[in-house]
Amino acid sequence: MSEQVLRPGSRLGAYPEQRDKAAGARRLQTLRQWITPEPRIGGRSFRCFLDHLHRHESGLRERSAAALKRETHRLRQRLYREGIDGDLPAHGFALVREQARRIMGMRHYEVQLFGGWLMLQGRLAEMETGEGKSLTATLPAAVAALAGIPVHVITANDYLARRDAELLRPLYTALGLSVGVVDDATRDPEARRDAWACDITYCTAQQVAFDYLRDGLGRQNHGDPGVSHPLLRGLCFAIVDEADSVLIDEARTPLVIAREIPPSFPPETWHDALAIAAELDRNRDFRIDENQRSVEITAAGIRRIERQAAHRTGIWQRPRQRRELARQALIALHLFQRDRDYIVRNGKVEIIDANTGRSMADRTWEMGLHQLIEAREGCAITPPRETLARISYQSFFRRYLRLAGMTGTAREVARELHRVYDLPVVRVPTHRPCRRRMEGRRLVRDQAALNAALITRIRDLRNKGRPVLIGTRSVAFSQTISRALTAAGLQHTLLNAQQDANEAAIIARAGEPGRLTVATNMAGRGTDIKLAPGVAERGGLHVISVECNEARRIDRQLFGRCARQGDPGSFETFLALNDPFLNNMLPVPISLLIKTIQRGKIGSMRTSNRVAGLLVRLAQWQNERRNRRARQRLMQAEANLKEQLAFSGKSE
C-alpha cells in the first residue's frame, strides 16, 4: 500500500478509511502461500534494512540533542513527501533507537527492530511475553507519525493505554511528536477530539470503535460530514497490542451504541418471569444446551407457561412474547452464574470478560437478559435500550488503511487473522534463549483432592523461596482457591475482576520471594513480572494453572508469565476431572470415559494423566471451533444486514 493511500486526510481534514472490503472479495490464501516461510530475522529484506539502519545510526551517537532535532525535522519532511515504503524508515528507526537510548536508557534489541519492521509493513509480530512489545511499537508508530499519518496504538485496557502513553511520552516529545490518550476518564468531546488529533493516540479498541460509530451517527444526523465535527481523523494506521485478545477473543460480540427508551411494561414483569421460569422442570418443560448456551422450551413447557400466565395481564397475554420472556428467564437462571459471568458491584450488575477476567461496567446484555439478571440479584432495574448503531470488530478493523499488531500468542489463530483481517503472522525469535520448564500435568479426581495437592505443592515451593502465580478461569474459582489457601494458613494476594483497579501493582510484585498470587486468567496482562534479587537463583517464578482454559492460547499466555528475557521459570497444571468446562465441552461418550478415569478404573494415574492431556486438548479444540463459528456467524449476519439495508446507506 503506497503512502499516497495512507496519508490523505491527515492534513486536509477528510475522513480516510478503507471501504468496501467485504470478506468475499478479499485475497484468498493458497496452500502454497501457507507453507512458504515468512521473513526471518536473517532474511534478505530485513538484513538489507538493518544495514541501512546501522549506516544511519553510526553517525548519530556523537551528535548533540540540537543536531538530532534538526535531523529529525529533515527526515520528517522527506517522509511526508516520499512515504514509509522506501528506505527512509531505516533512518527513522535509527533516530528512534538513539533517542530511546538517550532519554529512556533503553536501546532497541535487534529482535525488536525486526518486530517493528514487520509491523510497519502491516504484519502481526508474535513476540514472546516479556520481549518489550511496548518499546517495539515505538518504531513503526514514530516513523508513521513523522510521515504525517495518524497512528492509533490500541491495547487491551485503559490502564495499559495510560501507562504506555506516559512512559513513552518523553521519547515521542524528543522526536517532535504529540501523544494523546483516550480512555473512560476522557469524557468531554473536545478533550477526546484533541486526543485523536495528536500524532499518536493510545486507546482501547472499544474507545476508538465507539467514537467511530458516534462519528457515523453525526454524519447521518447532519448530512454534511463537515457539520458534525467528527472526533476521529479517519482510520489510517493501527498498531494493535495483545492482538489475539482484541481481534479474536473480543470479536464475538458486536459493539452497540444504544439509548434508553421508556419501558413497555412495569419492572415487576421481570420478577414474574423469573418466578414462572423457576416453576418449570428441566428435561420435561425445557432442555438446555450447555455448549451453545441456549434453552429450548418443550410443548409441555409452553402449556405450563400458558397456565401460569392466565391470571396475568399485559405482555403475558401475548403468546409469542411470553414464551420469549420465559426463555430468557430460564437462560438467566440456569446459564449465567454470579462471579463467573458477572459480578455485582455497588448495586449494579457488571459483565465479566470470559477471556481476561475483567469486568466491563459499560456493557449490557440484550433482549431483556440484563434486566432479568438484575431482578434475580435484587438490583435496580435499568431501562431497556434501543440500538442506534452497531459494528463488529471484524468489520471495523478491516477499515483501517493499514493494520498491524503484536502479541505473544497468535500462531493458533494465524489462519483466521489472515483470512479476516489480511494480517499475516510472523514469529519473532527471543532476544535470549528461553529457560521455561514444563513440570507436567497433575490429574486429581475432584476439587477437594485438587486443593490438597495444590497446598502441598505450594508449601514445597515457598520453602525454596520461589514465588508462585496461580491462574484460574473464573472469579468464583479464584475465590474457592483463595478460601482453601486461607484455611491452610497460606498468606496470598487475590486478583480477579473485583480488584482490577489494582491489578498492575499486584501482578508486578508477583516475582518477590515466597509471594503467592491467585489471579483470574490474564488479569494484569501487559504488566511485566520482574524477579526480585535472588529469585532467579532459586528457580524463578512458578506458574500453576488450576482450571481447564478455553483455548490453548490462554494456556500459553498464563505460562508465559514466567521465564521472561532469559530468566528461569517453570509451570505446571492441576486439573480436577469434575471440571465443568471439561465435561460440558466433550461428547457424551468421552465424558463417560472421564467418569471412568475419575473412579480409578483405567490404569495408573500416570496413564490417566496422559489421557487427561488429550482430553483437555480435545475440549479446547471443540471450544475454539465453536467460538470461531460464532465469529463467522457474526460476520455473515453483518454482511446479510448490509445487503438487505443497502438501499438505506451504511448499515452501522
Image (tube, helix red, strand yellow):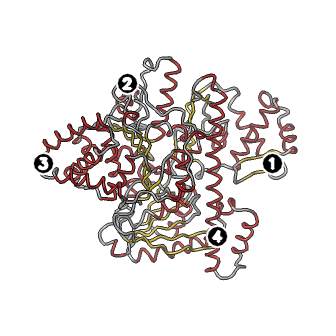
Label placed on residue 13: 2
> Where is 615 relative to 6, above or below?
below
> Where is 564 relative to 229, above or below?
below
Q: Are marks 3 and 4 in contact (CB under 8 Å)?
A: no
What crowding class fits label 3: few (fewer than 14 Cα within 10 Å), some (14-19), or many (20 or more)? Answer: few
* Circle 4: element type: loop
Q: Distance between the residues labelled 4 and 2?
A: 62 Å
Q: How far apart are marks 3 and 4 (CA)?
A: 66 Å
Which of these two is toward me, 29 or 120?
A: 29
Query: What residue sits 32% from the left and 66% below the top?
Result: 532
* Circle 2: element type: loop
Identify the residue under disc 3: 63
At label 4, the amino acid type is: Asp
- The reply, left or right, for residue 137 in relation to residue 438 is left
Mark closest to the chain's N terminus, 4 or 2: 2
Which of these two is toward me, 355 or 516?
A: 355
Mark closest to the chain's N terminus, 1 or 2: 2
Identify the residue under disc 4: 446
Between tags 3 and 4, which lies in front? 3
Residue 99 place in picture, x, y as percent: 21, 48
